[in-house]
Structure formats: structure tokens, C-alpha cells
């Protein structure tokens, strides 16, 4: 029978395929049918499939956007029957779910022994790099490229897509090879990177390596964001000490250099093994060891759960800040989903977003609601006016949040 990691791997693959995303966003049967077509379940296993979807939801690895109208909607925290599964649709993977899927693919890969051998070999023979720079294209000019130059000046080799790829190269294939061969991943975390698919996939691959190897792989660099933003978007990284671009690129490069040296690497010289498996990897062609996989997933789930609980405690102490962060994040999510769901769905989602904001502020913070509404409130007809209006509202939320954080510090 299908397992939670296999289910999440299917969900992520469907999300990555523009032609098949509607199989998750449509009715629940299309999701079940996708699992049948992938050879993961049989048509007579709907009860087990529903229960597994519920288990993934309980692990905070899978979530849903909508429930059907009806007399009785089962509680999502209870055991999931077929009725509970079919009462919901718009399923999507959470950050935890994407990390579990990446870990599953890492453990399942048929060439795991070859990758292990590459990790043990010196860089000169494996053609690896000291670091892989994970970044969004918006941060290339201001952060990624200057950082690569600063690291190279200090004797380190860094993989940067524009330096390694030429026309006609396979983007996904070359990036996956570079991720496997690089000793560390420098993850440039920014609002742009959290809104892009490729940086998130690269970060998930690095997280999977880190959990499987039991040693540090990700070196975070914070760019134009703060810890609260990290807690909300990537709780597994919230307790990591990260370099800050606000301190200057030379300072960031120095901090990365110290991390590499402490791990046993030598700039522009001999390099020793940094990442090695804590357990013997599965042999090619064999399924991942379920006991090892389940333990790794439990560890990952507990780390994310602990970070989320810490965030919820912070929300009780600073309710307005946390609310503003959540509303900003929701608007950004609707913006990303607009490409997939279309403008009409985006307009409806943002209308609901705006109504919620006004209602919340009017009920709990009446002294600022008029400032939020603007003068004049609302917007003239037309899509461009509507887009500008929501940008204005989002700008108010961001400015208010920044002022609260500055006052607190």
C-alpha cells in the first residue's frame, strides 16, 4: 500500500507539472485517479488512500484550500474516511511535505551509492564545488554574483548557474548534479526566493541531504527579511545563525569561509570529506528502508513542529505583528497562484483577503482601520486599478509591520 512519502512525492510532481496541477485543484477523485495512473494504488483502495491523505494532513505535510458545502463536514483532525477526503479539494503540499518528498527522492535514488562515493572523493576527481549558491534571479546582481566573486577571491569554488550552464544544457539535470557534488549549499533567503519554484526546490534538496547525512549542509544568508519571516516560511531554518547581507558581502563571505574551514575544507587546496551518509544507503533497485525513512521523517516533523510552536507562542505575545505577517504572506501566495489559477480566481481571493483585513482591523484595531482603507477607499473599475489598489493595501501592511518591529527593537 502507498506510504505518506510516496503520496507527497506524487503531490509535488503534480504541482511541478503545469499540465497536471488541476488534478489536485479539481475534485478529489482526480487526485485519487492520478495515484491510480501512477501505479501507487488500485481502484478498490480508496478507503486506504483517504486514510493516508488524512495522515499526511495530520503530519502538517498536506493541506487543502476548500471544503464542499454540505450538511456534515468531518473534522479534519479525526480519522479520514472516504467522505472526509471527498469533502475537501484543492490539496497542496506544505513546506514540511515538500521536505519529506525531497528526502524520499534522495533515499530512493538508484545511484545513491555512486553519490556517496562522489562525496568521499576529493574535489579534484569528482569535479565538485565547495558551495552551491541557491538564489532567485532577482538576487543575482545584488547578492549571488558578488558573493561568488568574493568567495573565489578567498580561494573557494562556488557553483553559480550563469557560470556553469551554457545554451542547450539541461537545467534540472545540471542543477541536481551540482547539488549532489557541492559540499555545502549557500541559500540566499529573500522574499524573492520564497516566491520562486527553483530556489525552493534547491533548498528542499539541500534539506533532504542534511537530514539524511546528519550534518550541516545549508549555510543561510538572509537578504531583506527578518527572523519572523523565516519562521513563517521556513521554520526548519528559524533557529539557524545566518549571515546578513545588510552587513556587506565581504562580511558574508568571511562568515562562509569560517564555516568551510571549521568543516575541514581548505581554500584552493586539499579538501576532506564533509558530507557522508550516517547509514549505508539502499542498494540500487531496492526500495528505501521503511524504518530508516520513518525515523528521518519523524525527526523532520518534530523539528518543524517545534519551530511552529515557538512561532505560535510569539503570536500570543505580539498578535498584531503575527497577523500582519500572515496577511502579507497570504497576498504573496495569491500572487504566485494567479499564474496557475487565473486572474478571475485571483480577484476573488484578493477580494476575500481585503474583506477579512478590514473586518479584523475594524473589530480589533479601530484606530487604524481608516488609515488602512485609504482616501478614497476602494478603487475605480478596471483590472489595473484593482491591482494598484491591492498593492497599496499590501504596502500599508508592510509599512505598519516594519514600524512595529522598529519600535520593538
Image (cartoon, helix red, strand yellow):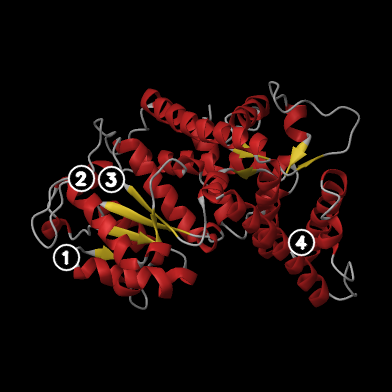
Q: Which residue is mark 3?
A: 111
Question: Residue at point 34% right, 43% down?
Answer: 209
Give me the disc on residue 155.
Answer: 1
> Which marked residue is nearer to the observer: mark 2 or mark 1?
1
Question: Residue at point 15% right, 56% down?
Answer: 123
Q: CB of mark 3 within 8 Å of CB of mark 1?
A: no
The numbered mark, 4 or 2, whose residue comes first in the sequence reads 2
The numbered mark, 3 or 4, whose residue comes first in the sequence reads 3
Does residue 223 lie above or below 388 as drawn?
Answer: above
Q: Which residue is mark 2?
A: 274
Q: Crowdedness of circle 4 by 10 Å Cα count: few (<14), some, many (20+)?
A: some
Q: Marks 1 and 4, how far apart in space?
A: 48 Å
> Which marked residue is nearer to the observer: mark 3 or mark 2?
2
Q: CB of mark 4 within 8 Å of CB of mark 2?
A: no
Q: Marks 3 and 4, how far apart in space?
A: 42 Å
Question: Residue at point 21% right, 64% down?
Answer: 157
Could you tell me residue 29's position as x and y percent?
72, 40
Give me the disc on residue 346.
Answer: 4
Is disc 3 placed on a helix, strand or loop?
Answer: loop
Q: Crowdedness of circle 2 by 10 Å Cα count: few (<14), some, many (20+)?
A: some
Is disc 4 placed on a helix, strand or loop?
Answer: helix
Q: Marks 3 and 1, how far apart in space?
A: 31 Å
Does residue 101 lie above or below 324 as drawn?
Answer: above
Q: CB of mark 2 within 8 Å of CB of mark 1?
A: no
The numbered mark, 3 or 2, whose residue comes first in the sequence reads 3
> Which marked residue is nearer to the observer: mark 3 or mark 1?
1
Residue 39 visible? The answer is: no
Could you tell me residue 206's position as x and y percent?
37, 48
Which residue is at the front of the view, 394 or 13? 394
Could you tell me residue 124's position as x and y percent?
11, 60
Q: Marks 4 and 2, how far apart in space?
A: 45 Å
Amino acid at each position: 500500500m502507498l506510504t505518506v512519502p510516496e503520496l507527497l512525492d506524487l503531490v509535488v510532481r503534480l504541482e511541478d507539472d503545469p499540465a497536471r496541477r488541476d488534478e489536485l485543484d479539481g475534485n478529489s477523485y482526480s487526485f485519487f485517479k492520478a495515484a491510480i495512473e501512477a501505479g501507487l494504488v488500485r481502484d478498490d483502495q480508496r478507503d486506504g488512500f483517504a486514510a493516508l491523505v488524512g495522515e499526511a494532513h495530520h503530519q502538517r505535510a498536506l493541506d487543502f484550500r476548500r471544503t464542499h458545502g454540505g450538511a456534515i463536514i468531518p473534522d479534519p483532525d479525526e480519522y479520514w474516511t472516504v467522505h472526509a477526503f471527498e469533502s475537501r479539494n484543492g490539496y497542496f503540499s506544505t513546506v514540511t511535505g515538500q521536505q519529506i518528498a525531497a528526502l524520499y527522492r534522495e533515499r530512493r535514488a538508484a545511484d545513491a551509492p555512486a553519490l556517496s562515493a562522489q562525496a568521499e572523493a576529493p574535489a579534484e576527481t569528482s569535479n565538485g564545488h565547495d558551495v552551491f549558491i541557491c538564489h532567485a534571479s532577482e538576487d543575482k546582481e545584488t547578492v549571488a554574483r558578488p558573493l561568488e566573486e568574493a568567495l573565489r577571491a578567498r580561494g573557494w569554488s562556488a557553483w553559480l548557474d550563469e557560470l556553469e550552464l551554457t545554451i542547450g544544457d539541461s537545467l534540472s539535470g545540471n542543477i541536481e548534479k551540482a547539488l549532489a557534488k557541492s559540499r555545502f549549499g549557500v541559500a540566499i533567503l529573500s522574499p524573492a526566493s520564497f516566491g520562486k519554484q527553483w530556489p525552493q526546490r534547491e533548498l528542499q534538496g539541500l534539506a533532504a541531504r542534511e537530514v539524511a547525512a546528519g550534518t550541516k549542509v545549508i549555510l543561510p544568508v538572509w537578504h531583506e527579511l527578518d527572523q519572523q519571516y523565516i519562521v513563517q516560511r521556513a521554520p526548519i531554518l528559524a533557529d539557524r545563525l545566518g549571515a546578513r547581507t545588510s552587513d556587506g558581502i565581504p562580511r558574508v563571505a568571511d562568515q562562509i569561509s569560517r564555516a568551510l574551514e571549521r568543516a575541514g575544507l581548505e581554500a584552493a587546496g586539499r579538501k576532506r570529506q564533509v558530507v557522508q551518509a550516517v547509514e549505508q544507503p539502499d542498494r540500487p533497485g531496492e526500495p528505501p528502508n521503511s524504518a530508516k525513512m520513518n525515523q528521518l521523517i519523524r525527526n523532520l516533523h518534530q523539528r518543524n513542529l517545534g519551530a511552529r510552536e515557538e512561532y505560535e507562542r510569539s503570536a500570543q505575545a505580539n498578535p498584531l505583528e503575527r497577523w500582519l505577517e500572515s496577511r502579507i504572506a497570504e497576498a504573496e501566495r495569491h500572487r504566485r497562484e494567479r499564474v496557475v489559477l487565473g486572474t478571475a480566481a485571483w480577484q476573488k481571493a484578493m477580494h476575500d483577503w481585503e474583506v477579512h483585513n478590514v473586518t479584523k482591523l475594524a473589530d480589533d484595531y479601530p484606530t487604524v482601520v481608516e488609515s488602512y482603507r485609504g482616501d478614497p477607499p476602494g478603487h475605480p473599475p478596471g483590472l489595473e486599478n484593482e491591482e494598484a489598489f491591492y498593492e497599496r493595501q499590501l504596502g500599508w501592511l508592510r509599512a505598519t509591520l516594519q514600524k512595529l518591529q522598529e519600535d520593538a527593537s
